[in-house]
C-alpha cells in the first residue's frame, strides 16, 4: 500500500531555541518543537517584494501519513504558486504514522501554527491571517486543523482525543486558521472503500490508528474533520479529481456537503478526468486556490 501510494503521488510532479539556515528570504529547518527532531522542522519562504511582513499559508505534503520529512515536496507542489501571489509560505514536516499514532500528526500541525504565530515578528510574518492547505493526507490534516479551531480535547462515546496537544513551548498561543484549501484529502475513514465502508486489511488509516478501522468507530470519528464542524469554522475550498483512484472522489463530495450545510463552503471544484495529482493540479485550479486565499486575506 505504501509503495503504491508513493508511486502515484510522485507521479503528480516530474519562543523556541532553534537555529535555521538563512539564505536570502528563506529560513530552512527551523525546529518548531524544540526537540531537534527532523520531523518537527519547517521552512519559511518570503516573497522578494520587500514588504515589512507577509500573511502566511502553511502547506502540508501528502504521504498517506507515512512520510515525516517531505516539506520540500509540499513547497514544490503548492508553495511556489502561493509565494508568487505574495504570501509567505510555511512548509512543515510532521510525524509519520510509524513514528506515533494519531493524534500526533494534528498535534504537530497545530504546534507549527503556534510557532509561526508566536515568532511572527522575527520572521516577517503578518499573523493577522493564517491560511492552510495540503494534498491527500496533507489535505486531511489541513481540513482537520480548520474544523478544530479552538478545540482542545474531544470525546466520542468513551474515546477522548487530545487534538491540540502540547508539542513545543508556545502552548498558550492560538493554533487557529482563517482559511483552508483541501486538495483531495481523505475525510471519512469509515467510508474509504468507495464510500461503502472502511478499507480492509493493511490500509494507511489502519497504520495511523494502529488498529482496524471497522473495530474502532469512535476513533475513526475523531479522525474525521466533519465530526468537528461548526459555524465558527473558517471558509473552505475543496478540490478533487473525478478519476482519483487513491482517495475516492466521493470523500470530497461528503465533505463539501457537510461544509455547505454550515455555510462554510466557498467552493467545490470537481475536476473531470482529474487523478490523484495529475490533471487535478493545473493552472486553473492553482489560480482558484490563490484567488480564494487572496480574497479571504483581504487582498
Image (cartoon, rainbow, N blue to C red):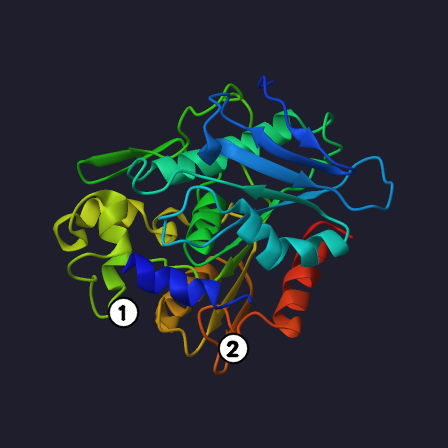
- How far across and down, in percent of the image, does residue 11 sit? 48, 68
Q: Is residue 200 left or right of residue 221?
A: left
Q: How many marks?
A: 2
Instruction: Please name whichever residue, 196 or 115, is drawn nearer the observer in this view of the structure.
Output: 115
Q: Earlier in the sequence, mark 2 or mark 1?
A: 1
Instruction: Please name whichever residue, 71 or 173, is drawn nearer the observer in this view of the structure.
Output: 71
Which element carries disc 2, helix, strand or loop?
strand
Mark 2 lies on residue:
271
Which element carries disc 1, helix, strand or loop?
loop
- Which residue is pictured at 63% across the width and 23% down the height? 19
- Which residue is pictured at 64% across the width and 53% down the height? 79
Q: Which image quarter holds the N terminus? A: bottom left
Instruction: Please name whichever residue, 205 or 40, is drawn nearer the observer in this view of the structure.
Output: 40
- How far across and down, in percent of the image, does residue 271 sit? 51, 77
Instruction: Identify the residue at the far left of this view.
Output: 215
- Which residue is pictured at 44% across the width and 63% down the height? 9
Q: Are marks 2 and 1 in contact (CB under 8 Å)?
A: no
Q: Is residue 33 left or right of residue 52?
A: left
- Which quarter of the figure has residue 54? top right
Is residue 239 in view from this perspective? yes
Give the crowd class for mark 1: few <14, some 14-19, many >=20 residues within 10 Å.
some
Is residue 150 in view from this perspective? no
Mark 1 lies on residue:
195
Q: In this picture, is 294 found above or below 144? A: below
Give the crowd class for mark 2: few <14, some 14-19, many >=20 residues within 10 Å.
some
Q: In this picture, is 27 found above or below 9? A: above
Q: In this picture, is 258 found above or below 169? A: below
Q: Give the number of the disc on residue 118.
A: none
What is the spatial separation of the Cα atoms under label 2 and label 1, in whole angstroms?
A: 19 Å
- How far across and down, in percent of the image, does residue 160 sit? 25, 34
Amino acid at each position: 500500500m505504501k509503495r503504491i501510494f508513493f508511486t502515484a503521488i510522485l507521479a503528480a510532479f516530474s519562543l523556541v531555541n532553534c537555529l535555521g539556515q538563512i539564505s536570502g528570504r528563506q529560513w530552512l529547518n527551523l525546529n518548531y518543537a524544540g526537540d531537534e527532531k527532523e520531523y518537527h522542522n519547517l521552512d519559511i519562504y518570503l516573497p522578494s517584494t520587500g514588504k515589512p511582513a507577509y500573511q502566511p499559508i502553511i502547506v502540508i505534503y501528502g504521504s498517506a501519513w507515512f512520510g515525516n520529512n517531505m516539506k520540500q515536496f509540499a513547497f514544490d507542489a503548492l508553495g511556489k504558486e502561493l509565494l508568487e501571489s505574495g504570501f509567505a509560505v510555511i512548509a512543515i514536516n510532521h510525524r509519520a504514522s510509524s513514528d506515533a499514532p494519531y493524534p500526533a500528526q494534528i498535534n504537530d500541525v497545530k504546534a507549527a501554527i503556534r510557532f509561526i504565530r508566536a515568532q511572527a515578528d522575527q520572521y516577517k510574518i503578518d499573523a493577522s491571517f493564517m491560511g492552510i492547505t495540503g494534498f491527500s493526507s496533507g489535505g486531511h490534516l489541513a481540513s482537520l486543523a480548520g474544523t478544530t479551531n479552538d478545540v482542545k480535547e474531544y470525546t466520542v462515546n468513551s474515546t477522548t482525543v487530545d487534538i491540540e496537544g502540547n508539542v513545543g513551548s508556545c502552548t498558550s498561543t492560538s493554533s487557529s486558521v482563517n482559511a483552508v484549501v483541501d486538495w483531495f484529502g481523505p475525510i471519512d475513514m469509515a467510508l474509504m472503500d468507495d464510500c461503502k465502508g472502511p478499507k480492509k486489511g493493511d490500509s494507511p488509516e489502519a497504520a495511523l490508528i494502529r488498529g482496524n478501522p471497522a473495530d474502532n468507530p469512535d476513533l475513526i470519528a475523531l479522525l474525521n474533520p466533519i465530526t468537528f464542524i461548526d459555524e465558527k469554522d473558517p471558509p473552505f475550498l475543496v478540490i478533487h479529481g473525478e478519476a482519483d483512484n487513491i482517495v475516492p472522489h466521493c470523500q470530497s463530495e461528503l465533505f463539501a456537503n457537510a461544509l455547505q450545510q454550515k455555510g462554510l463552503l466557498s467552493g467545490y471544484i470537481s475536476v473531470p478526468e482529474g487523478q490523484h495529482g495529475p490533471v487535478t493540479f493545473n493552472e486553473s485550479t492553482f489560480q482558484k486556490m490563490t484567488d480564494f486565499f487572496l480574497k479571504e486575506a483581504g487582498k
